[in-house]
Structure formats: structure tokens, C-alpha cells
Image: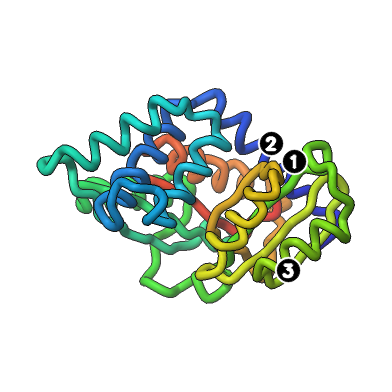
């Protein structure tokens, strides 16, 4: 795993999000609404909501915006019901792409996702066509610059809390968990005041695809940019080695 700077990727994502805060706040706002509908508005009794709040804070979402979102979702019986949908498909040269969306209009979302794939010379496939190439894991990234602990202490803390794996990169530590153990591990680290650069349940590629053709790179970037601009799209996972 070494050689891949996870933290550099996170910083790149964050910088991109800083340029388009409206998008990331929309994404998190929908996740808050779904978490509240599913488990109630009290974070103490709703681990999914606690995870979303942690994600919101990591993305510098103001506390009053978070609280407003929770109150709105809890108090408005007529608020929009979002449905979770996943699309899978192929980009250039067999690259695998998974798109998670929360939508109030599946037809609109499906058309937009299909259009993003088509414009990048890819195509949407059937359910399960590429997800077998990924592992679903809880992933926590801790930047070395934010961490006062040494690697062994952080590793033991994470493993004691139930983490599956720990690795050291050049500028960060990566902690992996089973999806069902993610909340427990994240909260254990939070209690020890460990600052997390990123923490979420994600899809990690088993292998990566390198693109060398300029046209292929342009095409996959076009697809990813179009998906990123779509408010219905929550997360995009791919196995392109950027």
C-alpha cells in the first residue's frame, strides 16, 4: 500500500470540496435527513447520525447548519423522502465506476448518471457488474501532522477498538474496519481526541487500472466531473489510478 498518499488524495478531495462547498453540504444534508428518518434525531441513540455529524464537522460544516438540518428532518413530516440508489458501470479501458445516489426522482438521476457515463465514452452496466472488484470497508485516515501519538500506539488503540487493519503511509495512517464496526472504532478514536482527516464507509478497489492514453484520461475525468456536479450523487468510487 505504501507509495499511495491517502492523505494527499483526501486533501485533494477537500480542496475540490472547498471550491464547491454547496455540493458537499447538499450531500451531507441529505445524509442527515436520511439518518434522522431512519433512527431519530438524537445522536446519542443513532450511530448513523453520529457518523454523519462527524463527517459534517470534518468538512467544516457549521454546527448551526448541522442542527438546522437535524431539526428540519425531525420536524417536517412532509420533507422530501430520499431513496438510495447505486449504479455500476465502466469507464475507458475497462475502469470500474460505482455511483451512490440519494434521490427523490429515480428517473432523473438514472438519466443524468447514464449521460455522464456516455459523455465519457463509458457505459452503465447491470447491478453487480463491477462491485465485486471492490471491498466495502470502514476507512479512517489520520494525518501525521495532526497526530501526537506514535504509529504503534495509534495502531494498538485502533486494533483494540475492533479495527481490521492498520497501515502507515508517508504522510498519514490508514485504519480499516468491517463496515459494521466502523462507528465503534471511529467513536473510540474520537474519545481519545484523535483528529481524523477522513472517516467513512467506502468501497476500496482490490486492484487499480492505470490509464496512459490522453483521450482515456480526458474521458474518465469528464465522467467523474459530471457525476461530481450532480446534486443527487453522494459518492463515486472508481479503480482508476489517478
- Residue pointed to by mark 2: 11
Q: Which residue is most to the left?
A: 78
Relative to residue 237, is residue 5 drawn left or right? right
Tell me the SS state at disc 2: helix
Pointers 2 and 3 in contact (CB under 8 A)? no
Q: Residue at x 38, y 55 (%)?
A: 46
Q: Is residue 113 above or below residue 176?
A: above
User: From mark 3 to mark 1, how far is it between C-alphas?
Assistant: 24 Å
Q: Is residue 19 above or below residue 239?
A: above
Q: Point out residue 213 in the picture as x, y percentages from the top left corner.
A: 69, 50
Inspect this view and state whether residue 77 appears: yes
- Residue pointed to by mark 1: 8
Q: Point out residue 105 in the picture as x, y percentages from the top left corner.
A: 19, 48
Q: Is residue 67 above or below residue 173?
A: above
Tell me the SS state at disc 1: helix
Q: Nearer the viewer, mark 3 or mark 1?
A: 3
- Residue pointed to by mark 3: 159
Q: Is residue 79 above or below residue 129?
A: above
Q: Point out residue 98 in the picture as x, y percentages from the top left corner.
A: 47, 59
Q: Residue at x 22, y 53 (%)?
A: 106
Q: Residue at x 50, y 70 (%)?
A: 180
Choose the circle earlier in sequence order: 3 or 1: 1
Query: Closer to the camera, 170 or 209?
Result: 170
Query: Closer to the camera, 125 or 33?
Result: 33
Amino acid at each position: 500500500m505504501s507509495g499511495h498518499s491517502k492523505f494527499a488524495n483526501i486533501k485533494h478531495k477537500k480542496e475540490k470540496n472547498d471550491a464547491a462547498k454547496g455540493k458537499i453540504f447538499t450531500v451531507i444534508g441529505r445524509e442527515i435527513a436520511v439518518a434522522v428518518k431512519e433512527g431519530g434525531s438524537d445522536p446519542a441513540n443513532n450511530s448513523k447520525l453520529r457518523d454523519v455529524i462527524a463527517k459534517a464537522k470534518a468538512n467544516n460544516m457549521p454546527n448551526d447548519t448541522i442542527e438546522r438540518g437535524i431539526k428540519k428532518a425531525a420536524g417536517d413530516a412532509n420533507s422530501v423522502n430520499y431513496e438510495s440508489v447505486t449504479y455500476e458501470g465502466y469507464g475507458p479501458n475497462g475502469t470500474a465506476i460505482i455511483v451512490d445516489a440519494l434521490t427523490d426522482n429515480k428517473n432523473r438521476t438514472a438519466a443524468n448518471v447514464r449521460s455522464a457515463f456516455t459523455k465519457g465514452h463509458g457505459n452503465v452496466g447491470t447491478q453487480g457488474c463491477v462491485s465485486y472488484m471492490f471491498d466495502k470497508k470502514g476507512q479512517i485516515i489520520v494525518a501525521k501532522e495532526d497526530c501526537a501519538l506514535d504509529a504503534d500506539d495509534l495502531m494498538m488503540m485502533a486494533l483494540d477498538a475492533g479495527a481490521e487493519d492498520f497501515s502507515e503511509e508517508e504522510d498519514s495512517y490508514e485504519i480499516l474496519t468491517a463496515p459494521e464496526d466502523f462507528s465503534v472504532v471511529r467513536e473510540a478514536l474520537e474519545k481519545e481526541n484523535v483528529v481524523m482527516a477522513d472517516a467513512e464507509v467506502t468501497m476500496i478497489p482490490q486492484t487499480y487500472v492505470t490509464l496512459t492514453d490522453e483521450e482515456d484520461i480526458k474521458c474518465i475525468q469528464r465522467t467523474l466531473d459530471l457525476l461530481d456536479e450532480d446534486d443527487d450523487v453522494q459518492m463515486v468510487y472508481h479503480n482508476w489510478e489517478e
